[in-house]
Amino acid sequence: MGKITPDQTRLRTKKTLGVVAHGGDPAAEKAAEKRASTLLELTELFLAEHVEPKRKASTAALYREIPHRLVLPEPGKKKADKITASELARLRLSLQDHP
């Protein structure tokens, strides 16, 4: 993030005060955003809770390999709630291209 001018700072402060005046909590929102899971974290949770205990070892290995090879390299570190519809469409297309 680069330098900001005093006018930009005033504008940001006004916006924040407006959010607070309407019952918002910018600090809580920021903390919640930091706690939000990444796509990688959600994938690992899904694999651990739903794939590993319910599938044969060979099937679980395939389920684990697919997202790590095709899905996670690009948006894996991105917060899951920040992934756009166009990114999901690209992922879907890439999955269709790879049997």
Image: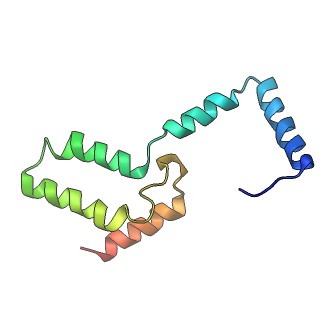
Q: Where is residue 73 in the image (x, y as percent from the top left)?
A: 38, 65
Instruction: Give the image quarter of residue 22.
Output: top right
Q: Name the image colouring.
A: rainbow
Task: Indicate the quadrant containing the C terminus: top left, top right, bottom left or bottom right.
Answer: bottom left
Q: Please say if 25 is above or below 89.
A: above
The answer to whether residue 87 is left or right of residue 50 is right
**Which residue is outermost to the right?**
7
The answer to whether residue 52 is left or right of residue 47 is left
Q: Position of residue 45 (x, y in %)?
A: 30, 42
Q: How many labels does the image show?
A: 0
Q: Which of 95 and 16 is in front in this view?
A: 16
Which residue occupies 11% across, 48% down? 55
Q: Please say if 98 is above or below 66.
A: below
Which residue occupies 77% across, 31% down? 19
Task: Indicate the quadrant containing the N terminus: top left, top right, bottom left or bottom right.
Answer: bottom right
Q: Please say if 88 is above or below 34.
A: below
Q: Please say if 46 is above or below 63.
A: above
The answer to whether residue 3 is left or right of residue 45 is right
Which residue occupies 53% across, 39% down? 34
Q: Position of residue 62 (x, y in %)?
A: 17, 61
Q: Where is residue 69 in the image (x, y as percent from the top left)?
A: 29, 67
Instruction: Give the image quarter of residue 13.
Output: top right
**Which residue is outermost to the bottom?**
97
